Image: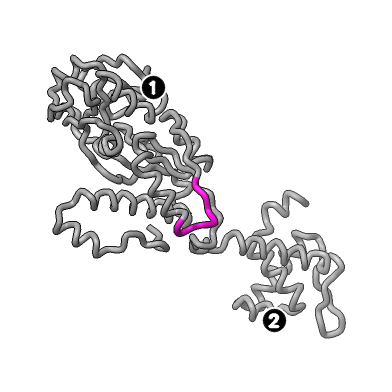
């Protein structure tokens, strides 16, 4: 009997049975369902066979449910209510009332520029929610973490983002070099690749992982290598290190300008062979249609748009200022 139930009792039949047991009338059930009486009678015969019980029997001129029918009525109602609840369209995300916690991973150099503003906006528009910034995993670990929901969103700058994930570009920026005030190149404006390769460098990542950075990856493509004499686990160590040594740090211009704003560091144009650094966000298909996740992506896009607006000319800034800075409830 269990095998028959599994294969034959679908949701439509369950709805028909609940109405039959509630109305105790084939004609009224047909009217409620917008079906013909013969069609409902056929469904009742199938249900009697599947459940192995008459379900409804005659009492004078009326139909009354059997004991088995009465036993089934409330469980059926709960089951169908539960199905309707879970299968109905997802409600729109309401940031002010939501207690949703967002988990974001970001490269440290990007986080210093974007993460404070992202958290500021999430806190301003979703005060009951929270944001957890997680350490960037290895590239081959990112997709599984996004697929499992342990991470909602990644902000990255790898030369080649994983193909299995959805991607949206945020900003493109040029690559520069940072040196301390006592460095011989502190007053220079740009570096050639030949000169760049002669210098001593500091990198926040060493070993095999360096090929996944815009700098290490590009040098690998050019079949070149630089002399990295110091590696550090945290980007926060780099400003003080540059101030005390003759090392060179290569990064995107936004991060370099951020560091130079509170430390006496000089910014030089990196060799033109490096090209540009692309910043983008990554997420998994499992979250693509989630209203909460779409709101988060829109918030990150707005932060990127604000940053890009700072680099526009006066006329473009005027046009940009005419647009809303953050559309709180807009879902992309």
Q: Which residues are magenta?
A: 124-131
Residue 9: % across, % down = 69, 58
Q: Measured along the vertical axis of the image, is residue 91 above or below residue 136?
A: below
Image quadrant where residue 281 sits:
top left
Residue 114: % across, % down = 36, 44
Q: Which residue is mark 2?
A: 27
Image quadrant where residue 10 sits:
bottom right
Q: Secondary structure at mark 2?
A: helix
Q: Measured along the vertical axis of the image, is residue 325 above or below residue 118?
A: below
Dot label at residue 221? none
Q: Is residue 128 magenta?
A: yes
Residue 304 left/right relative to 276: right
Residue 238: % across, % down = 34, 26
Q: Residues within 10 Å of mark 1 (few under 14, many from 20)?
A: some
Earlier sequence position, callout 2 versus callout 1: 2
The residue at 33%/23% (across/down) is 241
Q: Which residue is mark 1?
A: 232
Q: Is residue 164 magenta?
A: no
């Amino acid at each position: 009997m269990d095998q028959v139930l599994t294969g034959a009792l679908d949701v439509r039949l369950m709805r028909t049975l609940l109405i039959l047991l509630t109305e105790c009338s084939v004609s009224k059930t047909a009217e409620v369902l917008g079906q013909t009486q013969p069609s409902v009678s056929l469904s009742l015969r199938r249900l009697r066979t599947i459940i192995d019980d008459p379900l409804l029997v005659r009492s004078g001129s009326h139909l009354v449910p059997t004991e088995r029918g009465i036993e089934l009525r409330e469980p059926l109602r709960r089951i169908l209510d539960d199905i309707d609840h879970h299968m109905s369209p997802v409600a729109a995300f309401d940031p002010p009332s939501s207690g949703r916690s967002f988990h974001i991973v970001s490269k440290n150099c990007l986080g210093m520029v974007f993460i404070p503003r992202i958290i500021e906006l999430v806190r301003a528009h979703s005060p009951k929610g929270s944001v957890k910034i997680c350490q960037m995993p290895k590239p081959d670990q990112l997709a599984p973490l996004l697929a499992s929901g342990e991470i909602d969103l990644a902000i990255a700058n790898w030369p080649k983002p994983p193909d299995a994930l959805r991607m949206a570009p945020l900003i493109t920026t040029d690559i520069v070099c940072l040196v301390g005030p006592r460095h011989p190149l502190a007053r220079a404006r740009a570096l050639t690749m030949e000169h760049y390769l002669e210098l001593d460098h500091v990198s926040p990542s060493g070993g095999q992982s360096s090929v996944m950075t815009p700098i290490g990856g590009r040098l690998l493509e050019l079949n070149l290598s630089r002399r990295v004499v110091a590696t550090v686990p945290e980007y926060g160590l780099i400003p003080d290190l540059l101030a005390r040594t003759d090392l060179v740090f290569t990064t995107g211009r936004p991060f370099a300008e951020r560091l130079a704003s509170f430390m006496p560091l000089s910014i030089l144009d990196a060799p033109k062979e490096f090209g540009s650094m692309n910043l983008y966000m990554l997420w998994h298909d499992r979250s693509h249609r989630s209203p909460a996740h779409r709101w988060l992506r829109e918030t990150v896009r707005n932060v990127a748009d604000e940053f890009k607006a700072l680099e526009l000319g006066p006329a473009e800034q005027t046009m940009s200022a005419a647009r809303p800075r953050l559309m709180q409830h807009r879902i992309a």
